[in-house]
Image (cartoon, rainbow, N blue to C red):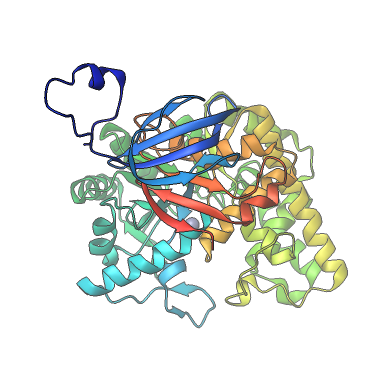
Amino acid sequence: MALVATGVVAAACLDRPLTIEPVDLVIEGARILEVRSGEVLEGRTIVVDDGRIVSVTGEGAESPPAKRVVDARARLVTPGLVDVHHHTAFVLGDSVSEGGGFIARLSMEPDSIAAYRDRFAEAYLPYGVTTVRDAGSDEAHAPMLVAWMEPSPDAPDFHPVGGALGSEEEGRTPFPGHAVVRDSSDAVTKIRDYQEVGYRHIKLYWRLEEPEFAAALSEARRLGLNVTGHVDFQVFPFERALDLGLTSFEHAYTVGVGAMTREEFMAAWREQTPEWYGAEARGRFYLGVLEYFHLLGPENPRVLALIDRLAETGSTVVPTLHIFAQRLGLTWHTTPSVGAFDDTSWLSPEQREHAIEGYRILAGYVRRMHEAGVRLAIGTDWTDPGQAVLSEMLLLEDLGIPMMEVFRIATLDGARAIGVADEVGAVEPGLRAHLIVFDSDPLVDPRAILGGKTVIKDGAVAHQAP
Ligand SMILES: [Zn+2]
């Protein structure tokens, strides 16, 4: 650790000349977006050493000698972004199944782990994303997942959950990123095994029946692990997950599903979707989900009651709006469809408009969550995740959420949701130096987040705009 030039050091200088080792990095003249207070601090100097922010000083303060200086005069500096819902298969998967779903067939040789990490870093760092939670990857990839947990300046921090846990179902092969538990004691064993391997995060999937869900959740909490749930399709009631103390929920659409009766749910999925889109819509995920929201309508009292309950319990919801918006041409970045389940190219203009109306109802509930005090976090759950993070931020801004708050959602609130806010998520002394210096100001024009930026990870410049 280098000494920082302060008055105290100078006063301690005795008869021999004091050689002050330069710090790693100084960022001068920054406009810091203080996500905690919602203020912009003008003309600040950020001193970084050994990967951490050492000090943030105001105008007139002298900068210590530094190995590298970034001139950020009048440029906005924000914390690095957090994606709380990643799947390695979406970035690294090298084939698509015949049914149209993703399958990851990765060879886990030691050198491929390093090569895959480069691809992972390339998918995120140029977009300013410095912290990622993997929300479920193939258990066969455990050597890679565990190796990536070691933080380094050349890739985002990586927080894996192992496999997303589901109950055993006869005759069904689980998705590659999922792990099956047979009963509640098996669920407890799985959580303990995961903790032993080094995982600090657990994901409970909606295919988990109540006894296993309750057992896994309570064991994970006992061990101090961070838990999130994707509670969906009414295998396990959403309200019951709240009763059991779960406070982190993946996908805003599940709040709508959670408020539906079984009959409504079946009607939307099986009948109403073909009614609007024709028989070929059957089983198409995006259209089916948006159809739920037509059925619920924009002011559904049960959805609003569930939102109140999420707010009262201090819960976080991860909206994942981008996965819908990109299929309907509502955002700046679209990944080509990977199979029948997400192909919307065949929609007529009227059908597309109908799907967009469903999206608007879903997105309206996300705005209601924000207004009610439900904490949001950015999760992508998709390929091109760096672009998807920026897309998700702009989609939240489209809902009328001020950019200042969108940044808090994308940084501090994401870090809180996954339990790492004591390390990252703000520009403050003591925290790891994960920073973005924007070439033009996203508080003036939100789309400036898509423009040039310098990205700093653990105190090192990881990406610089050409
Ligand atoms: Zn997912």
Report which quarter residue 322 is drawn in: bottom right
> What residue sits 50% from the left and 52% below the top?
454
Q: Pinpoint residue 18: horizontal percent, then vertical percent.
A: 18, 29
In the image, 136: left or right of 286?
left
Query: Which quarter of the rendered picture does the C terminus lie within?
Result: bottom right
> What residue sits 65% from the left and 41% below the top?
259
User: Furthest-right residue in view?
Assistant: 350
Q: Nearer the viewer, residue 243 or 383?
A: 383
> What residue sits 51% from the left and 50% below the top?
235
User: Furthest-left residue in view?
Assistant: 15
Query: Which quarter of the rendered picture does the N terminus lie within?
Result: top left
Q: Nearer the viewer, residue 420 or 260?
A: 420
Q: Nearer the viewer, residue 49 or 258?
A: 49
Q: Pinpoint residue 429: horizontal percent, then vertical percent.
A: 38, 29
Q: Is residue 368 above or below residue 189?
A: above
Q: Is residue 152 above or below residue 306?
A: below
> What residue sits 68% from the left and 71% below the top?
282
Q: Pinpoint residue 179: horizontal percent, then vertical percent.
A: 34, 59
Say whether residue 237 is visible. no
